[in-house]
Image (cartoon, coloured by chain):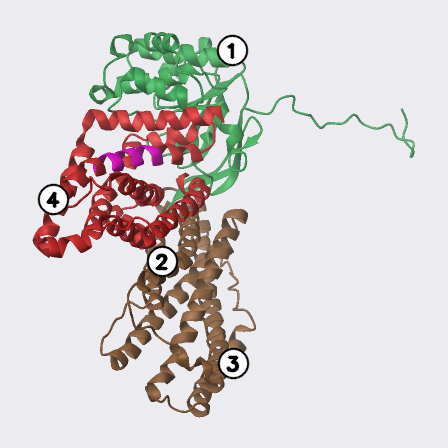
Amino acid sequence: MVTENGMTPRPSLRIERATPAAVAAEGLARRFGRRWVLRGIDLTVEAGQIVALTGRNGSGKTTLLRLVASVLRPTRGTVSVFGFDTRREGAEVRPLVGLLGHSAGLYDDLTAGENLVFAQRMAGRRADGALISAVLDRVGLAPFEFERVRGFSAGMRRRLGLARLLLRPPRLLLLDEPYASFDEDGIDVVNAFATEIRAQGGAVLLSTHDLSRAALVLDRRLHIVDGQIVESSELRGPTLAGGRA
Amino acid sequence: MNAELTRIGAIVWKDLTAERRTKANFNAVVFLAGLILLLFGFAIGTEQASMQPIAGGVIWLTVLFSGTLSFNRSYEQELENGALEMLLLYPGDRRSLFVGKLLANLLFVLLVEVVMLPTAALLYNLPIWTFLAPLSVVLLLGTIGFVTLGTFYAAMASRLRAREVMLPLLLFPMLVPLLVGAVQATGGILNGDIMGSTWWWVRFLFVFDVIFFVAALFAFEYVIED
Amino acid sequence: MNNEVISRVVPPPPRWLRPLGWIALLGFVAAQAIGFLISAPDRDMGNLQKIMYVHVPSAWVAMLGFFVVFVLSIAFLVTRREDHDRRAAATAEVSVLFTALTLVLGSIWGRPTWGIWWTWDPRLTSTAIMLLIYVGYLALRAFTEDEDRRARWSAAVGILGFLNVPIVYFSVKWWRTLHQVQTIDAAGAIDSAYALALLLNSIAFLLVFVWLVALRAHVARLERLRESWIEDEALVRTGSEAHV
């Protein structure tokens, strides 16, 4: 085909996205009072990826996860989840994400089972006893279904938080230090869950101190220092020798 | 709508179950209410003549001072483990959080009143049994307005450093019309005047409740976010 | 950051601010003078009645101010524009000042008139409640550090607070009609000279009010600007310099 001025037009180089990225952040910054915790983050996490955030304590990993979850609003910049801006379209973002934070957000005076019943009903659904027993079993808390959370250890609480996410697996799974306070079984559950999400076309963003735990399932690693991403590397789990990054 | 009713029901169930298990809150508030009633006796005098005219005021100040304790506490269980964040993450209308908390607090305070009112009647020889039906209406209407505003302001106050001071500072001036109306109606009923000005104040309370329920419902989602 | 000098432009106050200030000042003096001159001392109260020329306009202007806070609060929640919040806060501060003035003057008027410092007059009482409501508004702002939260929360409080203003007034009024109580009385309003003086003073007070609010809002704008410059600098610093 020839255009008016006789030139052959070049094919368009603009690539249309078939599906929006699971997470897309641009110039994302957040401060608390006078302290900047994140100072201009650009990142993209595609669907079908498991990405680890590494960095020291206080480098901004938790804040980044909470911003992606739409729990926090950005001070500057934007972040979107599957194409929905967290600030303006929070209502569309929330059904898509699942967050497991440091403290699992449980009620001490309810039992493990009751906490899960509450979670189901808060999602607008009927309580499903069979499903609850099943997820508790999967995280190894089946014997504690009728125990009050008040007596739980930190590890048990996080397992329960994980169980809550298993009730309704999200498309974007956000895990803050998921390997902390877990034993080998717990770690396997986390990795299995992450792998499932990835297989279903979702994505996982997790923060960790210790890459070796996640090494088997990771696709990418982002390293944060002082609120900025300084390194982004591709990893292929099985090719890693001994779990070193 | 169905989903929202489920969510509201879930919050009411959760708050009441947690409360039923610890009873710490309820016992403390009931005890404080009893104490305040006693203190009024010491402060004002226990003669029939001195107590009867101000019985309405004594009752309602007792409700206000003791009931206010429960509002911040209602949010503290959400703050201690980061549960509030989870609540905000569930899909659905955030106003259901308000309605749920309001209903749970309402039941709580009404229960406290169920204990407190006969105690007041006992201490000060008040004829509550004769007028139980109209008194219940006034108590219900007054408590609804009280709990609506208390639940609303505590959503903010509970997250501030000076929460014990901020909640009364924000809440009590707003409760003045409610206090006036409830005390007038209660006093009127106890003196045997059911119709007339008492009925007028009852309608006033109803209008107050409606106005502030709607306003608080509208404003709540701006307030509950982080 | 290296040592380059970055020039920052400090925005000047609005051009009409200074002229307004002068007009307001002159207007206030003139209106007060007129008040003293054109209406004779009251039969019963003598020159004390002249206090009404400050008390009543203060009350009126404060009430207007709280209405403005109400409107700006709604505007903020709808648009999320920071300047609405800033202006609402400035207006609330100045209105609280005028409310306090109203109360003090009302009390001063009451003392020689009735022999007591306070009467549960509906207007005075509801003004006192209004003062408490908005002192709560200001306290809330003082205790909330995050700007976004502070703006949202005070907007909510400003809206509900204003809704209560007429309700408080009527409830106290209906309560007090059951008892005989002295009221602060603008009975002299029948006198047309008095009414004229009141009108002139109200206009003058309105000008003073607007001037004060505009000044305060401008200062708030400068404060916010300074904050954002400091923010920007902190953003690019790293490591131990990162704290502001």
User: In whole angstroms, how far apart are the C-alphas of marks 1 and 3?
Assistant: 73 Å
| Residue C62 in the image, given as x and y percentages of width and height | 42, 67
- Tell me, yes or no, whether the highlighted magenta stretch contains residue A89: no
The residues colored magenta run B102-112
In this rendered view, identify the residue nearer to me: C193 or A170. C193
User: In whole angstroms, how far apart are the C-alphas of marks 4 and 3?
Assistant: 59 Å
In this rendered view, identify the residue nearer to me: A19 or B88. B88
Q: Which chain is green?
A: A
Q: Which residue is mark 3?
A: C23
Q: Are marks 2 and 1 in contact (CB under 8 Å)?
A: no
Image vertical order of residue A226 relative to residue A109, above or below: below
Name the subunit of mark 3.
Answer: C
Crowd tier of the residue under label 4, counting other residues whose Cα lies within 10 Å: few below 14, some 14–19, many 20 or above: some
Q: Secondary structure at mark 4?
A: helix
User: In whole angstroms, how far apart are the C-alphas of marks 4 and 1?
Assistant: 62 Å
Discs 4, 3: same chain: no
Q: Which residue is mark 1?
A: A199
Crowd tier of the residue under label 3, counting other residues whose Cα lies within 10 Å: few below 14, some 14–19, many 20 or above: some
In this rendered view, identify the residue nearer to me: A46 or C19. C19
